[in-house]
Amino acid sequence: MFTNDESVRQIVSLVFEKYDLNNNGYLEMPEIAAYVNDAMKVQEKREATDEEIRIFLQSVDLDCDQKVTKMDLFKVLKLNLDKH
């Protein structure tokens, strides 16, 4: 299944609207933790561990700068959604 790029961009925009609390265009560790925790609560009914948050950051932070850009998140979401 191929996901429409515009749909993925809309998802990324919604994520950043909710979690980029300082509006700097990046998700930094506290914001990433909030995003991952919310996703875990929906999927597994529990909060993420520090290790799960670290693993998520490593998998999404494509340039290894300890923050997630919209493009980082877009690329990872697009890849994962296309697999399903």
Image: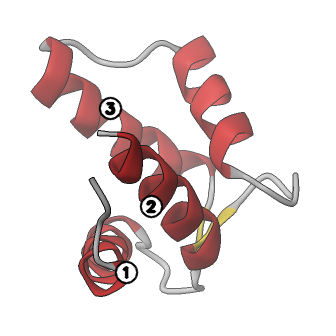
- Residue 81 rendering spot, x and y as whole percentages: 34, 50
Element assignment for label 2 = helix
Per the image, label 3 sits on a secondary structure element best described as: helix
Residue denoted by label 3: 37
Residue under label 1: 5
Identify the element where label 1 is drawn.
helix
Give neighbour class at mark 2: few <14, some 14-19, many 20+ (Cα, 10 Å).
some
Q: Position of residue 38 (x, y in %)?
A: 24, 38
What residue is shown at x 62% (from left), y 47% (from top)? 29
Residue under numbered circle 2:
78
1 or 3: mark nearer the eye: 1
Establish if 5 lies above or below 30: below
Q: For residue 83, which quarter of the picture?
A: top left
> From the viewer's perspective, is 51 left or right of 32?
right
The tag earlier along the polypeptide, 3 or 2, is 3
Counting residues from the N terminus, which is met first, the one under dot 1 or under dot 2? 1
**Mark 2 and mark 1 in contact (Cβ < 8 Å)?**
yes
